[in-house]
């Protein structure tokens, strides 16, 4: 009787990677057929490349062509033989995903929409499940969140423009976010001893503004002119 060769760590890792890659390839193929059933004129599969370093861990993303609403499918971790479907949320101008607030007090519901179904279902059956059980709950929330992200991006741009306009009036300098993901309010710093620091701050939804400024009366009038009366 010949002893079975002991698998080295490197050999085991290579085998597991090969198996995971094959499973991911099969999942992408399945997702492609689901997209066809959902309607290739409306939906598209965001494919990955097997040359990607982490391809074996990728999940197929299915995206609506008109507005970018997308969801992904993958193997359910705690339910062998089932497929898990969950949504992705719009990203703001910094690349941060802006998820809705889910709780018992939220009009978005208590948890993000998701479904599972048996992996044995055909692509046509899976597509019908997604259309009937997932999309009606997910798409309205995604569209609502996309509108909120647009407002957030506009607010950030307006905040930046306003801070620079005030800095020009006060001969000051704008100190803003340290990086793209920093939400620090823009601050206008003046270097005249009697003026100190001027803060330009917005509340969380970006609709209300608070300005604390130390300046001459003439400068104050120029700053006030940046806010024309509402029609």
Image: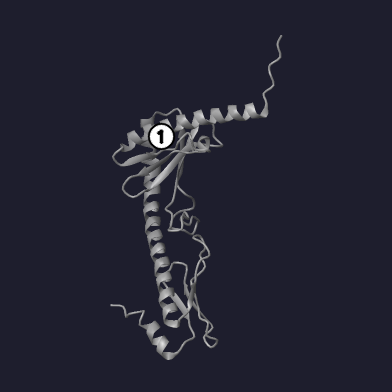
Q: Position of residue 152 (x, y in %)?
A: 41, 63
Q: Position of residue 141 (x, y in %)?
A: 40, 53
231 vs 194, left or right, is left
82 vs 6, left or right, is left
In this view, the residue in front, 188 or 151, is 188
| Residue depicted at x 38% and y 87% | 221
In the rendered view, would you say 34 is above or below 198? above
Quadrant housing residue 165: bottom left
Q: Residues within 10 Å of mark 1 (few under 14, many from 20)?
A: many
Quadrant housing residue 65: top left
3 vs 152, left or right, is right
Q: Position of residue 205 (x, y in %)?
A: 44, 67
Q: Quadrant of the C terminus?
A: bottom left
Q: Quadrant of the N terminus?
A: top right
Color scheme of the displayed model: one colour
- The mark tally for this picture is 1
Tell me the residue that label 1 is attached to: 31
Q: Position of residue 114 (x, y in %)?
A: 46, 44
| Residue depicted at x 42% and y 29% | 121
| Residue depicted at x 39% and y 37% | 129
In the rendered view, would you say 116 is above or below 7? below
* Residue most extreme to the bottom: 217
Q: Label 1's element?
A: helix
In the rendered view, would you say 87 is above or below 217? above
């Amino acid at each position: 009787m010949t002893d079975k060769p002991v698998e080295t760590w490197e050999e085991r890792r290579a085998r597991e990677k090969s198996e995971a890659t094959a499973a991911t390839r099969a999942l992408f193929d399945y997702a492609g057929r689901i997209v066809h059933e959902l309607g290739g004129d409306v939906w598209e599969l965001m494919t990955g490349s097997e040359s990607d370093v982490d391809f074996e861990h990728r999940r197929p993303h299915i995206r609506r062509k008109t507005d970018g609403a997308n969801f992904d499918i993958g193997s359910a971790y705690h339910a062998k033989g089932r497929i898990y479907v969950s949504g992705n949320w719009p990203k703001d101008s910094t690349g941060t995903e802006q998820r809705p607030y889910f709780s018992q007090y939220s009009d978005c519901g208590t948890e993000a929409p998701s479904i599972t179904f048996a992996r044995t279902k055909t692509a046509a059956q899976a597509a019908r499940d997604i259309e009937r059980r997932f999309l009606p709950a997910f798409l309205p929330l995604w569209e609502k969140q996309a509108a909120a992200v647009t407002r957030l991006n506009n607010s950030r741009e307006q905040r930046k423009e306003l801070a620079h306009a005030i800095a020009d009036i006060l001969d000051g300098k704008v100190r803003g976010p340290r990086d793209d993901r920093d939400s620090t309010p823009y601050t206008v710093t003046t270097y005249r001893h009697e003026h100190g620091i001027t803060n330009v701050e917005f509340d969380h939804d970006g609709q209300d503004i608070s300005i604390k400024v130390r300046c001459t009366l003439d400068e104050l009038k120029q700053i006030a002119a940046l806010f024309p009366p509402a029609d």
